[in-house]
Amino acid sequence: MKPFRLTKLASCIALTGCLAGYSLSAMAGPTCPENLDPAADYKCVFFDVGTSFSGTDPDSKTSAFYELGYTGTLATSIYTPGATPPVVDPVPIPIGSKVYDSNIKEVLNYYGLSGGPTNYTAIDGSSSQSMKDTPDDPGQRNIDNLNGPSPKDTENFDSDNSFGGIGWGMTYDYFFEGEWTATGARFTSGYIDFFFEDWTSGTSEQVLRVNVTGSQLQLANLNVFGEVTFDWTGGGNDIYGLPSIGDGLNDCTSTLCQNFFNFQTSTPTDFFSLVEGMGITINMKLDTNINPPIPTVDQLVEFTGDDGNKYWIRQTSLDGSIRFVPEPGSLLLLGSGLLGLGSFRRRKAAAA
């Protein structure tokens, strides 16, 4: 059985005056400003890492941050060829054809990229591109920065274990799926899985999944949008042998997972109770800063996938940010603790 925890939510509802400011006293460090962006596309988050990695801080909570930053992420994009190499720009990718993006080895292997780093000749017939099927771990698949006000309390956040096993970090795997349009790639499904890395014990635990819901292509950027979920196993496997859409059951069963992601100003603070207990939709915005967002022929290499079809592959390095915000309609109700009282999402417990 995959249990569903309502303890924290029930205790909050029982309190009179269970307001948004309630969460601030439980969080270390300065208050994070939530008015930096007029688009209001974020709310500040903090993390409860389960233990005091700093050794001097009495609790296990970080201060609050407005976004997670990442640099040097190895991103691999996969396209359907529209011509036989050598070809010239603009790259002839058929409109309506499938587009994929991932950092997962099994996905890249399926589409023909294995091993490496290896130098390949691009589809322009002359350029050379170095590619590999596995990102450096953790350096090319990790959160590098917790961007927020100073002084920061990070509980010894160490993005790449450079402190030598005395802190914690966060890594992620992702798979995006969509189609090629007249203006470029448009992603409509897929996921990002977030993992807590305990460098002291050497253990790793998944603490969140975001299901991709859409994307937005800009001049020198691609934004990807999604919704937070705690369901990431079951429901059958896709063609890569990886978890697909889930089975409708809660997979976040540990205290660490259920307490890890939190909003600075909400009641309750933790994502788990908000999503699973109150039915609130938490949105994510991932800013990739990919430039150019549309590939050029000197960046693409042709491979043959396991299905016998040809694919054009580009590898790039992404530097960007990740923000979280509740669905706009629920923002005013978060502090009251009243949203969803008559309609707790019990489907997962009932299905177990």
Image (spheres, rainbow, N blue to C red):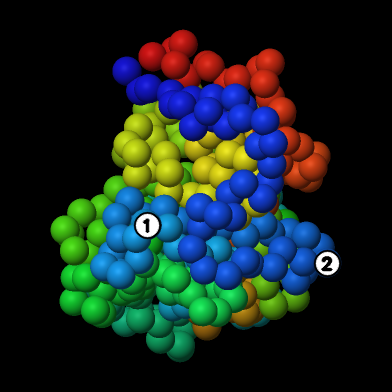
Rendered-image quadrant of the N terminus:
top left
Calculate the distance from the C-alpha at mark 2 to the C-alpha at mark 1: 33 Å
Q: Is residue 147 left or right of residue 207?
A: right
Which image quadrant is residue 9 in? top right
Q: Is residue 134 left or right of residue 324?
A: left
Where residue 226 sits in the image (x, y, percent)? 61, 48
Residues packed near mark 1 inside 10 Å, few (<14), some (14 to 19) or many (20 plus): some
Amino acid marked by disc 2: Pro
Taking the spot 39% from the left edge, 14% from the top edge, the residue there is 352
Residue that label 1 marks: 59
Element class at badge 1: loop
- Judged by depth in the image, the label closer to the viewer, 2 or 1, is 1
Counting labels gives 2
Residue that label 2 marks: 38
Say whether residue 314 is visible. Answer: no
Is the residue 342 above or below the residue 215 in the image?
above
Q: Are marks 2 and 1 in contact (CB under 8 Å)?
A: no
Q: Is residue 193 left or right of residue 262?
A: left
Amino acid marked by disc 1: Asp
Element class at badge 2: loop
Say whether residue 20 is visible. Answer: yes
Taking the spot 53% from the left edge, 28% from the top edge, the residue there is 11
Where residue 284 sits in the image (x, y, percent)? 62, 53
